Image (cartoon, rainbow, N blue to C red):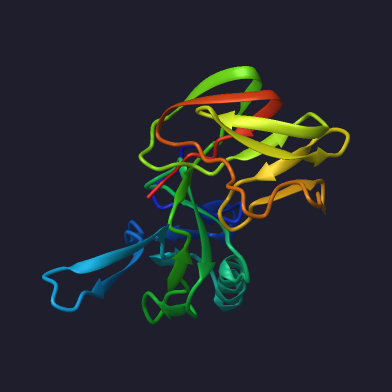
Amino acid sequence: MILKKGNFYINGKNGIEDLHAILENYPTINIPKRKKSLISIEGGNEQIILDEGAYDNREIDLNIIVRAYDEEDRTLRLSALYSAFDTDKYISFMHYGEPNYEYLISNAEVVTSSRLTRTSYYSEVKIKLTAKAFKQYRPDESVTVKGTTKTFNRFNYASRPLIHILNSGVSTIAINGKPYTFGPLPSGGAWVDCEESQQDVYNGNTIVENAFNVGQEFPSLPPGIVTITAGNAVVYPRWRTI
């Protein structure tokens, strides 16, 4: 994707074209903190590291200029911008500095706005966001698997794919030789969402009950060459990185 300097997308809305808004500068985006704690050992010279293998959310700070031509126009356009970022869930955010990466964000704090000058209808808006630790590569690709197929994860982190299994009944998909079994699946198959916060099997809007053992892992695609084996499936890798 190519974005003009200063442009962004929020939940599918184009900053310049839909919201009359432009990023004043490159967003400030911190690196997410790894979830781990240090435990002291009595009499020891070091601490034990307890690692959860996960990350906290990251913070994103935006400075946005909203253009307007009179007071009513200013009010309406500020309202439209606030509405675009106001959410009770995670939504998509992309910006010109990283046009092929999508952040999943939610508004963390109330926005603040001020006029650029006393006589101007242009406004400067500051917004603080919270975002999931990983940013996802876009556009996503798909890998059709009928037997054994290889793909390549060029990122340094394992991805959590979305898998469309097209077979009914009990189906197995293997990643680098490790099998994962799902089923029984309904006619036409089902979707397997491997995202850590989801990990469900569904068909349309309906969860497929008893489609996996509660204690079993869901597939991930590790860095490097990935060998996928399945009877008939389409894998959406959802490549991601920090």
Q: Return the x and y of residue 236 as percentages of the image width and height.
A: 60, 35
**In front: 146, or 125?**
146
Above or below, 101 against 105 in this view is above
Q: Quadrant for residue 224, please give it.
A: top left
Q: Residue furthest right?
A: 187
Q: Is residue 90 left or right of residue 60?
A: right
What residue lies at 79% left-to-right and 29% top-to-bottom? 167
Q: Return the x and y of residue 227 as percentages of the image width and height.
A: 51, 24
Residue 33 appears anywhere in the view:
no
What residue lies at 43% left-to-right and 65% top-to-bottom? 57
Q: Is residue 130 left or right of residue 80?
A: left
Residue 52 appears anywhere in the view:
yes
Q: Quadrant for residue 74, please give it.
A: bottom right
**In front: 87, or 9?**
87
Q: Is residue 92 left or right of residue 37?
A: right
Above or below, 201 against 123 in this view is above
What residue lies at 61% left-to-right and 77% top-to-bottom? 72
Q: Return the x and y of residue 182 as percentages of the image width and height.
A: 72, 40
Q: Residue furthest left?
A: 45
Q: Return the x and y of residue 143 as percentages of the image width and height.
A: 60, 26
Q: Quadrant for residue 237, please give it.
A: top right
Numbered disc total: 0
